Image: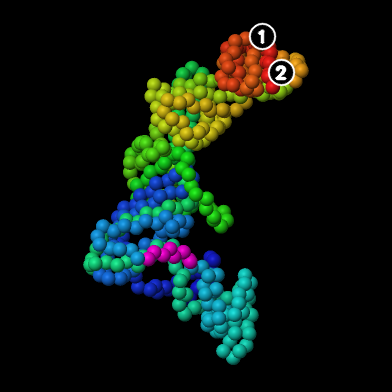
């Protein structure tokens, strides 16, 4: 075996493996991806076995698979006796480690060949002992080729699952192999387009982003993704270096995702096979763009002890209903919001992350903070009554400098044991610790609210 110096100084390998009975070409592959950087991979193939004991091997499996999760089943009378996950992959350092104390050859830049027993090596040099007993220290920068008699036992080119099986016959049988692998996850992405003045409905679309760093590519896979917070037992894993990914987008798929329930989660199945390359981010449309309606609200939220001023948050509320163009379970993900400009170009105005949102629930998307709408909160008085209660007198001032009316909600986070007294405006006790003051504010106006809150200890 010869290692030619090049990128990583491994150029070509001539490898002879121990004889096994290989699996025939792949027939079907299924990939179910979860939110938690984990996926279930299932491969269905045919294999040729011999009567009695024989070995079969599944090459090119995910390098980050959990070997304890592997499940194998045969369609005929074949019994697995042993299973091995081989992951000691070929690289320059592993080959040199395997050849410590053994004979190798070095071809130098001046065409000289040095033969000897490998005593040690590091990033800069190789130490050999020649047949004459001399010790040679050779700088790696002068080495063109590293020559070894054979590939060391135990090293493999790709991660491999291997079984020792016992069969009652010789011939073909179907085999189904499934395993869990880390490094393969997914998340949803949403685009919300706010129309320019004169248009009434917003546009909403979603993509599924699949990130594959599992160490394997999946060709023509039948893809499913599961939305929900599955529980995973803690695992120990060595730190991994930064990985380079590429980006691939699939626009207008021939068959999109179909949703259905799975246990206490939601499953989305793609209606066509898809290629998922290693070190790739692939995007697939979750649903086509739909027209929806939403409610724009300006929010001023404070706790009971806050004093000061700040711009109001801007948010959109969108009903996830069929009547509003949706009515499907929406997986957790990032919503990016764009505003249609007067020249019909799209301008990015903010983003927010939504939780898993069931059919019939309401999306709440916080876009940013308003430039022309500001709130000021002042505590006019605060006093305690003999250690039994505390009284706050508060002034809330909201200034709308926009040229159109707006909807405002003021949320006061209060102590649970207490009540509102002497409010100048209507309010709603949303919960034990939340009081809502709703406002419909005219253009270029200021609104002032005063109220007293009595808290019991």
- Residue situated in front as seen by the camera: 294 or 199: 294
Residue 373 percent across, percent down from the top left = 64, 19
What residue sits right under mark 1 in the picture?
Answer: 422
Name above or below for residue 286 compared with residue 364: below
Q: Answer with mark 1 or mark 2, whichever residue precedes in sequence.
A: 2
Callout count? 2
**Residue visible at 23% across and 67% down in the picture:** 169
Tell whether position 87 is magenta: yes
Left or right for 149, reference 116: left
Name above or below for residue 259 compared with residue 16: above
What residue sits right under mark 2 in the picture?
Answer: 389
What span is colored magenta in the figure? 82-89
Crowd band around label 1 with a 10 angstrom C-alpha radius: few (<14), some (14–19), many (20+): few
For discs 1 and 2, the disc positioned in front in the rendered view: 2
**Residue visible at 55% across and 32% down in the picture:** 352
Location of the C terminus (image quadrant): top right
Left or right for 82, reference 385: left
Q: Which secondary structure lies at badge 2?
A: strand
Residue 34 percent across, percent down from the top left = 44, 44
Magenta segment's dominant SS is: strand
């Amino acid at each position: 075996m010869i290692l030619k110096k090049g990128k990583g100084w491994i150029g070509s390998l001539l490898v002879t493996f121990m004889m096994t009975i290989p699996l025939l070409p792949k027939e079907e592959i299924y990939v179910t991806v979860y939110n938690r950087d984990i996926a279930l991979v299932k491969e269905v193939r045919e294999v040729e076995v011999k009567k009695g004991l024989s070995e079969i091997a599944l090459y090119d499996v995910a390098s980050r698979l959990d070997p304890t999760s592997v499940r194998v089943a045969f369609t005929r009378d074949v019994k697995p006796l042993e299973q091995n996950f081989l992951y000691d992959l070929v690289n320059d350092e592993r080959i040199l480690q395997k050849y410590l104390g053994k004979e190798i050859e070095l071809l130098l830049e001046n065409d000289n060949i040095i033969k000897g027993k490998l005593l040690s090596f590091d990033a800069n040099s190789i130490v050999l002992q020649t047949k004459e007993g001399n010790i040679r220290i050779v700088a790696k920068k002068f080495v063109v080729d590293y020559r070894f008699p054979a590939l060391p036992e135990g090293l493999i080119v790709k991660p491999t699952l291997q079984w020792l099986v016992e069969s009652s016959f010789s011939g073909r049988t179907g085999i189904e192999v499934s395993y869990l692998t880390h490094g393969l996850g997914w998340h949803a992405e949403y685009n919300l387009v706010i129309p320019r003045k004169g248009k009434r409905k917003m546009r909403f679309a979603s993509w599924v982003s699949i990130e594959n760093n599992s160490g394997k590519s999946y060709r023509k896979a039948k893809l499913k993704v599961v939305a929900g917070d599955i529980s995973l037992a803690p695992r120990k894993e060595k730190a991994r270096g930064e990985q380079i990914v590429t980006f691939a987008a699939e626009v207008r798929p021939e068959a999109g995702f179909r949703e259905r329930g799975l246990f206490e989660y939601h499953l989305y199945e793609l209606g066509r096979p898809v290629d998922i390359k290693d070190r790739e981010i692939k995007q697939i449309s979750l649903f086509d763009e739909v027209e929806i309606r939403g409610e724009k609200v300006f929010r001023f939220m404070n706790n009971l002890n806050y004093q000061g001023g700040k711009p109001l948050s801007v948010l959109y509320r969108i009903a996830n209903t069929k009547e509003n163009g949706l009515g499907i379970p929406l997986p957790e993900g990032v919503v990016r919001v764009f505003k249609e400009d007067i020249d019909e170009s799209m301008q990015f105005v903010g983003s927010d992350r939504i939780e898993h949102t069931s059919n019939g629930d309401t999306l709440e998307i916080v876009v940013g903070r308003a430039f022309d709408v500001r709130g000021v909160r002042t505590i006019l008085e605060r006093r305690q009554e003999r250690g039994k209660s505390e009284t706050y007198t508060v002034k809330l001032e909201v200034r709308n400098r926009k040229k159109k009316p707006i909807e405002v909600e003021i949320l006061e986070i209060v102590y649970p044991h207490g009540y509102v007294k002497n409010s100048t405006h209507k309010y709603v006790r949303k919960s034990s610790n939340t009081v809502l003051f709703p406002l419909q504010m005219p253009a270029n106006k200021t609104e002032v609210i005063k109220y007293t809150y009595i808290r019991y200890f």
